[in-house]
Image (spheres, rainbow, N blue to C red):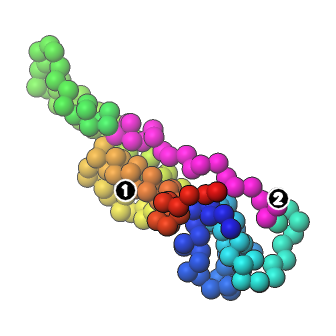
Amino acid sequence: MKDHGFRKVMSGKTSAELLDIITNQRSEYHANALLDAQAILEEQGVALQLPSAQTSSSMKAEQPVSYPYAPFLTALGFIAFAFYQPSHQVSYQQALEMNIFVNVLMRVIVLLWSYSLANKFKLHKPLWMILGLLFGGWSLLAIAVTCWIKATPEKDSDTLFTSHS
């Protein structure tokens, strides 16, 4: 059977768990994970009664996962901006006001984006909110990398190095 990237994870579950995933928890799983779970059940000879709209022939594998590049690039911009030095003379008061304004604006952007990504990728929201407040652009960079890791389906090392004929 074809591996959609979730076979290793799904093969560790019992038939009852796989049936529950396919019938009751469909919205919580990636389409490719559902295809692998269904294929494992078919291999085990478990009868699966799905409505016609949910059969394996009509269920199509999703396109590759889109990674959140915008937070990553924005974080790099925030970090680079931290090293910016104005080319003209600025008074201490002006520099302080500008620094406070930019810092507060950046923290608000980081907090909103972190909350949104934590919801989308089912991460621990309070942790990312605290990190966003404390570390700003660095935490946005960290959550972007975490989302990439979470969005990438686990590949079985055996299937990576075998030829498909």
Q: Is residue 33 magenta?
A: no
Q: Which residue is mark 1?
A: 129
> Residue placed at 64% from the left, 57% from the top?
165
- Reading the image, the residue beneath label 2 is 58
Residue at the (79%, 64%) spot, across then down: 56
Q: Residue at x 22, y 34 (%)?
A: 82
**CA separation, marks 2 and 1?**
40 Å
Q: Quadrant of residue 28?
A: bottom right
Does 164 appear above or below 22?
above
The residue at 45%/38% (across/down) is: 70
Q: Secondary structure at mark 1?
A: helix
Query: Residue 147, can we see it?
Result: yes
Viewer-proximal residue, 86 or 103? 86
Q: Amino acid at mark 1?
A: Met
What amino acid type is highlighted by mark number 2? Ser
65 falls in the magenta region: yes
Query: In this orientation, which residue lies closer to the viewer: 163 or 51?
Result: 163
Asked if 151 appears above or below 48 in the picture, the reply is above
Q: Residues within 10 Å of mark 2 (few under 14, many from 20)?
A: few
For the stretch drawn in magenta, the main secondary structure is loop
The magenta segment: 56-75
| x and y, in percent, of residue 108 in the image | 38, 43
Question: Is 54 in front, or is 39?
Answer: 39
Relative image position of residue 113 (x, y in whole percent): 44, 46
Question: For the view shown, which residue lies furthest in the top direction?
Answer: 88
Name the mark on residue 31. none
